[in-house]
Amino acid sequence: MLSGQSFEADDHFDRLHDSLLCLIFNKIQDAKTLGRCLAVCKRFSSLVRQVDSLVVKVDCVDDSVDADDRNSSESHGSSLSIGLAKFLLYRIISKSFRFLQRTLLFNQKKSISDGSPFHYSPVQVLKRFNEIRALRIQLPDDSGGYGGGGDGLLLKWRAEFGSSLQSCVFLGATSFQKTKLTCIEKGDRNDCSMSSASVGGEETSHGSHGSFCTNGKLKLRIVWTITCLIAASARHHLLQQIIADHPTLRSVVITDSCGQGTLCMGEEQIAESRQCLDSSRTSAALPGRTRVPAVNVKLWYVPRLELPGSGYVMEGATLMAIRPVDRPPEKEESEVSLMAGAFEGEEQGKTFGEAVRAMAKRKARILEMDSF
């Protein structure tokens, strides 16, 4: 090439049809990456806004705590007389409230100090997209390390909402671990037997079912129930502005990075919620969350649950099916199938399904909780 000769390089993206570019952008899904694509050129900007499938990951949240909030939470927790319950109420409920309230306050901001797109608020991020149909929001892990099991607690829940709570499935355990193979020193491989390692479990295989209601175990399960319902209602509250802003929305999933809790809304449920938002019949909301209706809680409890199919053992295994009192109950077979499938898409979904089916064969306790 001669010096001084100029030429214009071909832009290979110009050869791609708009429909193909839209397909590529929909495969990307990540809101932060697509936000950068908006700034590439006018063509990209117009096409990215037409993306119909989106994943918004809330990266971080300020972890500062006001002294008054901390003291209030600790004084409330002390009345429960259960150290673990105090921890759950403070770390899970209080921090979840602070995070979601902070997210709602941030909706009014458009940028952070370095000029980059503001990425703490899903509501603000989603204003760039006009045709969203499928939305997934991932919140930071705010469970204090107790979301996924391991040597600590197992707390898993999945809730479905319309204009209000429709159903919730909860699975919990005070210890959730893989069993270990132990062999007799002088024996051969056939002499190996399965023994479980239980760390921090409050119940053993010799635990008494009769003591469930009198030694604090039931109270702890009630705390777990309230915890997951408050977290679910706070996430539902966050969705209200998003539903109002995006009439094309057909499905929403809100989860967290550790996979502890999941809120789901389908097309009919979103339509129901939108109808209530547009009418004067909208139910009264509390600061930072939707009001939880009066519910029936069907509770199964097993002091020690061994799962031979997956090789896990659960101490203090707890399963709960939560439904509003005004919704008709499911048939037993259908209820078990729905509960077992609640965690199907997760890494240990088969293990959780095995636990649900094993526990559902036992006798259930029925509780009722007032609206809060």
Image (cartoon, helix red, strand yellow):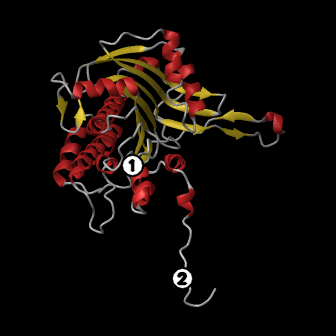
Q: Which residue is the site of mark 1?
A: 49
Q: Nearer the viewer, mark 2 or mark 1?
A: 2
In the rendered image, the vertical position of residue 354 relative to residue 129, given as above or below: above
The residue drawn where x is 54% and y is 27% is 304
Residue beneath the point at 27% across and 61% down? 111
**Circle 2 residues within 10 Å: few <14, some 14–19, many ≥20:** few
Q: Quadrant of residue 310?
A: top right
Q: Secondary structure at mark 1?
A: loop
Q: Which amino acid is tagged 2? A: Ser
Residue 166 at least partly seen:
yes
Give the vertical position of 297 relative to 25 (above or below).
above
Residue to which mark 2 is pinned: 6
**Image location of residue 244, percent across then percent down:** 26, 36
Residue at the right extreme of this rendering: 188
Q: Residues within 10 Å of mark 1 (few under 14, many from 20)?
A: many
Q: Position of residue 89 (x, y in %)?
A: 30, 39
Q: In this orientation, which residue lies closer to the viewer: 238 or 70?
A: 238
